[in-house]
Amino acid sequence: MNSRRKALVASHVLGSTLSLGVTVVMLALLLFAMSSDDEALLRVDDLLLRVVAIPALVVALATGVLVALTSPWGLLRHTWVVKKLGLLLVTLGFALFLLMPWLAAGERWLVLAGLVLQLVKLTLITVLSIYKPKGRFGKVPERAPVAVGRG
């Protein structure tokens, strides 16, 4: 693996792990906010979502696509890669179109459920990266039968 590819993979891993880590921090802050009625903690969660979580998800998505396109795995060849891509797109969309408005409206219980769901999705993405379950899209070329004869 050349140094450019290593840098790309490292950027992907950093974006992904940062997304997971900031989600855990946001969840902890929300729980503190819910137990103390501290509105400032909700504003910190909103800031973390906008400034750290969403950009980290975008980095993970962009670098993940580039890594897939430059690897033998391909972007749409293996089911685990497609599942990761789909989950990451859903996670990013969820953050942009649901979590942001819920945080802005102060909907603590919805944000709590949303962050737990984000955590589950990001954990599943990580597990798929590690285990790489088998499965391919498209037809795998069949091998021609081998003729065994007496010789």
Image: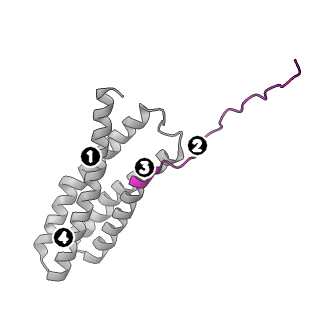
- Quarter of the image for the N terminus: give it: top left
Task: Give amino acid for label 1.
Answer: Leu
- Foreground disc of the pair 3, 4: 3
Work out how far the residue at label 2 is from the one at label 4, CA to CA, in angstroms: 41 Å
Work out how far the residue at label 4 is from the one at label 1, CA to CA, in angstroms: 22 Å
The residue where tag 3 is placed is 130
Image quadrant in which you'd find residue 71:
top left
Q: Nearer the viewer, residue 108 or 13?
A: 13
Q: Is residue 45 left or right of residue 145?
A: left
The residue where tag 4 is placed is 29
**Chain part drawn in magenta:** 125-151
Residue at the outermost top position: 151
Q: Earlier in the sequence, mark 2 or mark 1?
A: 1
- Which label number is shown at residue 136? 2
**Residue 37 vertical placement versus 43 (above, below):** below
Q: Earlier in the sequence, mark 3 or mark 2?
A: 3
Task: Give amino acid for label 2.
Answer: Arg
**Residue 93 vertical placement versus 151 (above, below):** below
- Quarter of the image for the C terminus: give it: top right
Give the image location of residue 109, x and y in percent.
Answer: 29, 77
